[in-house]
Image (cartoon, rainbow, N blue to C red):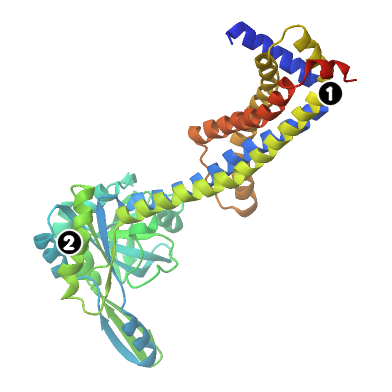
Amino acid sequence: MNLPMLLRGARAGVASLLLHKTRSLLTMLGIIFGVCSVIAMLAIGEGASFEAQERIRQKGARNIILRSKKPAGDATAGGAKRSYIADYGLKYADMERIRRSVPGIVRILPQRIEPKRVRFPKHAECEVVGTPPLYREMTSTEMVEGRFLTDWDEREQKNVCVLTEDLARTLYGHVSPLGEEIRVANRAFTVVGVMRELSRVYHTAAGGGAPASEGRVFVSLHTFRTHLGEQNVRRSAGSFQVERVQLSFLTIEFASENDVARAAPLIRHALADLHKKQDFVVEVPLDELRALEATKRLFSFVLGSIAAISLLVGGIGIMNLMLATVTERTREIGVRRALGAKKRQIVEQFLMETGVLSVAGGLIGVVVGVFFPYFLSWAIHAISGHAYRVVVTPWSVLLALGISVATGIAFGVYPARRAANLDPIEALRYS
């Protein structure tokens, strides 16, 4: 069928469908809702997966993260004893042992994190992060104003700090805090920079979930070790608990993802003799990312399959309409056959009408399906205040439109063949 004949057949199909506008529109609604639901459900699933993958990617696909963890036995002993000292977690010696025994390491970022109260000009609960200047490079930290910690600060153990943007706003409002002093555990620190807030994937306090905090203060790791110490003392009536942790995190960056796969078991083996109490956790973001991608594929398939049921219902509606049309136009078919029309031409005529229905419904469904997820996201944010991300991908639009057209034509084949196989003489007698 050449282009002029195709256009002529499309016009004839549109004219035939317009004879019964309401019936044609109701039939198209099945396709419209089907396409819309496929795009919307895939967009919602893609958005949820995107956020989860972004959180994992922030850890770095070429990184392995070691996190100190309070052993289960120590956690229960604290409630039974009035005085209690716990020494657990990652040590500086662990970092050196890993550096010597595990191949492929590019650099290692140690961190010590402790909840503290900062003072001046206001009070705020925060997390103090002791880290080398390497932190900014490894985490792609964005500075709002001022500078980050330097090698000079680290080497000279300078009492300088960098605040996260939210903590700076809590303490100083809209006034620049650069050059101001804050006190952390009775130590004065001069503010030299304000940084953009990062995801908390790097900042979960050692030994469990992070306490509620109003931001973070970054100081050099040597300064932290010298002035703030490695012990956290919690006192209550007649008792005290001391937790001694040298390092909260070790983020180990490798040259390639293949090095990461080989290094994880080597790290566990290297530290096994030094940590009998299982007081650390090894996190491999690359494994998490691969598992999440596999889950995402399954999730998208399930959501798409559920939404495709709507398209199936729409296809059944098209078949029902075309069967009714064949019955109504039996005499017309007989006349065309008597005048020399071939079976193929009758089939093409009816398939053109189903094609017009499915393409028109599919295009309307695409428009609605593209905008509906964003409207849903806006409505959720307006009602709950929680921002829900949706991602409409080109492949989901093409998939939904392709399936709608294929469904419409597939369900139009039987009515078309039934029309073509009518006996011309019997069709002429039909009234």
Vertical position of residue 13 compared to residue 100: above or below: above
Q: Hey, which residue is sitting farthest left in the picture?
A: 100
In which image quadrant can residue 6 be found?
Answer: top right
* Rendered image: mark on residue 28: none
Q: Residue at x 82, y 23 (%)?
A: 20
* Mark 2 residue element: loop
In front: label 1 or label 2? 1
Question: Of label 1 and label 2, which has the lower sequence position?
Answer: 2
Between 186 and 383, the one nearer to me in the picture: 383
Q: Looking at the image, how many numbered discs can be counted on the residues?
A: 2
* Rendered image: mark on residue 157: 2
* 10 Å crowding of disc 1: few (<14), some (14-19), many (20+): few
Q: Position of residue 27 (x, y in %)?
A: 75, 32
Between 267 and 36, the one nearer to me in the picture: 36
- State left or right for residue 103 relative to residue 336: left
Between 409 and 206, the one nearer to me in the picture: 409
Q: Position of residue 374 (x, y in %)?
A: 59, 40
Vertical position of residue 44 compared to residue 25: above or below: below
* Mark 1 residue element: helix
In which image quadrant can residue 202 be found?
Answer: bottom left
Residue under pointer 1: 328
Vertical position of residue 429 compared to residue 45: above or below: above
Q: Residue at x 35, y 93 (%)?
A: 82
Q: Position of residue 138 (x, y in %)?
A: 25, 49
Q: Residue at x 55, y 44 (%)?
A: 304
Can residue 428 be seen in the rendering of this structure?
A: yes
Task: Say what amino acid the circle numbered 2 marks.
Answer: Gln
